[in-house]
Image (cartoon, rainbow, N blue to C red):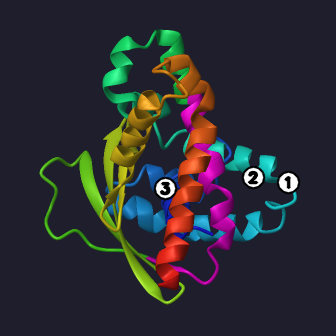
Amino acid sequence: MNVRNILIGVILMGLGASATASDGMIEATRAQSAEQAVELATDEILELIEAGREYAQEDPERFYVEVEAMLRPLIDFRKFADNVMGKHRRNASEAQRARFADSFKWSLVRTYALALTEFGGGRVEVLAPRRPPRNPDKAMVTMEIAYEGKTYVVAYRMERAEEAWKLRNLIIEGVNIGLNYKNQFDAAMKDGQYGGDLDKVIDAWSDFIDEEEAAAEEEAVAEADV
């Protein structure tokens, strides 16, 4: 299992809340600071992971729905997807943008959801900010995740909108996840098999990401064997 996928899953889920979420998760997204939001959510995410192990492999669709419900209020998928489309957004119709946002959302959920169940014995620690934020509604939160004998440093950009914290981007061990997806979309648009056709790229997005993730995991395995 790709460690990066596990880390992204933990971070995304750790900050989520849904209409059916526990009081603890709802309280987390309404916290005064982004750091408090993460701290309040830590116990909730660990409980969710533990519960997911009971059925995720046998009934992944159920787990996907649970993950999507938790992510929905946390991430503005339409805005995130528009950023991923980058310059190609200018040539997209409203219907294409909406369709890609939905495709992007479910590709994100399917890529990272089951990775969560592999997070056994991990430890998450939110670091105190070095200085007060210039804008109280924006924050870059640093988190350390200890997993399989290693400590990974993660940063994510948070913004508070309508009194709730929203995730805007992730940086994991120096890798900008939002920019990474943007580059992948641009690469797909330049790929000869799609011919620069937005509809074809949107239709094939999930498969394209699966191929990219598989290639990245094979590369990571190869590097580990060196």
Mark 3, secondary structure of its residue: loop
**Amino acid marked by disc 3:** Leu
In the foreground, 221 or 206: 221
The mark nearer the N terminus, 3 or 2, is 3
What is the number of the mark on residue 63? 2
> Quadrant where the N terminus lies?
bottom right
Residue 195, percent across and down? 49, 21
Q: Residues within 10 Å of mark 2 (few under 14, many from 20)?
A: many
Q: Is residue 41 left or right of residue 107?
A: left
Q: Establish if 4 lies above or below 223.
A: above
At x 52%, y 39%, the residue is 73
User: Quick check: can you spot residue 17?
Assistant: no
In the foreground, 125 or 40: 125
Q: Which residue is mark 3?
A: 15
**Amino acid marked by disc 1:** Asp
In the image, which residues are magenta? 102-124
**Amino acid marked by disc 2:** Phe
At x 31%, y 51%, the residue is 157
Residue 87, percent across and down? 31, 24
